[in-house]
Amino acid sequence: MTYTVERSSTMHTILDPATEEVVTEVAGTSAEGTDAAIATARRAFDSWRGVAPADRARLLRRFADAVDEAIDELAALEVRNSGHTITNARWEAGNVRDVLHYYAGAPERLFGRQIPVSDGVDLTFKEALGVVGVIVPWNFPMPIAGWGFAPALAAGNTVVLKPAELTPLTAIRLGELALAAGLPEGVLTVLPGKGSVIGARFVTHPDVRKICFTGSTEVGKQIMAGAADQVKRLTLELGGKSANVVFADADLEQAAATAPYGVFDNAGQDCCARSRILVERSVYDRFLELFEPAVRRVKVGPPSEADAEMGPLISAQQRERVSSYVEGDGADVAFRGDSPQGRGYWYPPTVVLPSGADDRVWREEVFGPVVAVLPFDDEADAVAKANDSEYGLSGSIWTRDIGRALRVSRAVEAGNLSVNSHSSVRYSTPFGGYKQSGFGRELGPDALDPFTEVKNVFISTEG
Ligand code: NAP
Ligand code: MG
């Protein structure tokens, strides 16, 4: 298969999504610049893999400390570049710090095994892969970068990182902080610019041994096809259309009060957004009654304000895309929250009632503050409806029956489920998708495995 790589990236103007003001201009890396960075990363790998485990751990801890000291600065950058609320942006920068600290424990714990065999000793080693390409989307620029680079570096790889063209500012700053903390040149290199230039070159360049991609299912599939040519290792975190399943025996007040935050956080631009709400038919009307004031209470406004709960969408194009599912399709809007008028890519929290499970708004990832609600009849129907999706990333189950909570958790085809809450992400627990939401797991104890090869060595004790 031929995978097309464009040659040049131009200047990209960064706009503040809350005001449409120009923040700055960022020069895009060319294909030649990408090749040069990959060559530097390849040379850096020869020494980085040999750094004593305790020293590699110490450098990652110093990097974490540097991120911690820069939390206010990083958060302010994210507010301007991405329109994230200041509360979220601070959490996101703190998440990079925490993920670095967590994986700083890994270099000294990359254990192999000693396997009993006859006539000798058998050992396994977890070896680093080489240069890893991390491709990051615009929705969570900091956390998703950290989930890739922290375990990759801990396992002894070097990293070339491509932030989304729309949101490169925090990644560029993280690259500077890594250098300032003492990571050698070429160990973590941030390459702002276009996916069709830099990301595509990661796919075709033989020295990039693995790609860790988060983004759209469409581009993920292209990368997967392109990676086949060199049997390149791949982790894919793609889209989602997660279900929030509310049973009649649940704490309905709590389920309704929290449901807006399960989908409208980050203005719905979250692959874990619980954008399909399934409610048991006997409590469907009551749930909607409770849900309406909860949606109207969501505080949508300038993201730099301390009490803002939802900011704008990332771009005019994204707003158009989101609107196509509601205004475009003439969806049945049940109720809406508020949003500022005037400049900025604002879109109000919106609840729609689809005519059935075939509606586009029920099936496709909207990636905006739009949630669809449908009733279900019984447990079997709830599971069938939840699983009637090409995606399988996350989901929530609301019930007071612990047996049911466990049965439904096991039956729903998704990688991250929460019972009586909407939590998907902890740095110490695995995160990733079923079906077309991707494969491979990030975070938690298993995330080092996809950044290493297992090598087996047999040593004869005979003769
Ligand atoms: P996207 O195109 O998949 O972008 C994700 C990353 O891949 C960006 O860094 C992008 O660079 C890069 N990229 C684009 N084309 C590439 C290629 N041919 N080879 C290698 N890398 C490439 O996503 P999008 O266009 O920003 O968003 C479109 C939709 O995808 C959203 O509306 C949403 O439904 C979904 N999405 C999902 C997630 C998620 O977390 N699962 C994240 C973002 C978007 P550029 O920035 O230069 O394009
Ligand atoms: Mg795209």
Image (cartoon, grey):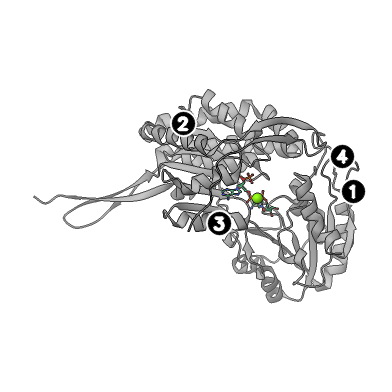
The alpha-carbon separation of the residues under discs 4 and 2 comes to 41 Å
Foreground of the two, 314 or 68: 314
Helix, strand, or loop for circle 3?
helix
Q: Is label 2 in contact with label 3 (beta carbons under 8 Å)?
A: no
Whether residue 18 is situated above or below residue 226 in the rendered picture: above
214 lies left or right of 355: left
Crowding at dot 3, Cα within 10 Å, few <14 / some 14-19 / many 20+, comes out as: few
127 lies left or right of 174: left
**Image location of residue 462, percent across then percent down:** 11, 51
Query: Which of labels 2 and 1 is toward the front?
Result: 2
Foreground of the two, 451 or 318: 318
**Image location of residue 344, percent across then percent down:** 83, 40
Residue found at x 46% / y 33% = 187
37 lies left or right of 71: left
346 lies left or right of 231: right
The type of residue carrying mark 3 is Gln
Whether residue 148 is situated above or below residue 37 in the rendered picture: below
In the picture of the structure, the residue carrying the numbered disc 1 is 338
Query: Which of labels 4 and 3 is toward the front?
Result: 3
Foreground of the two, 311 or 137: 137
Helix, strand, or loop for circle 2?
loop
Q: Which mark is residue 343?
A: 4
Q: Which mark is residue 309?
A: none
Label 3 beta carbon less than 8 Å to ligand 1: yes
**Image location of residue 113, percent across then percent down:** 32, 50
Which of pointers 1 and 3 lies earlier in the amino acid sequence?
3
In the picture of the structure, the residue carrying the numbered disc 3 is 222
Helix, strand, or loop for circle 1?
loop
Q: Which mark is residue 186?
A: 2
The type of residue carrying mark 2 is Gly
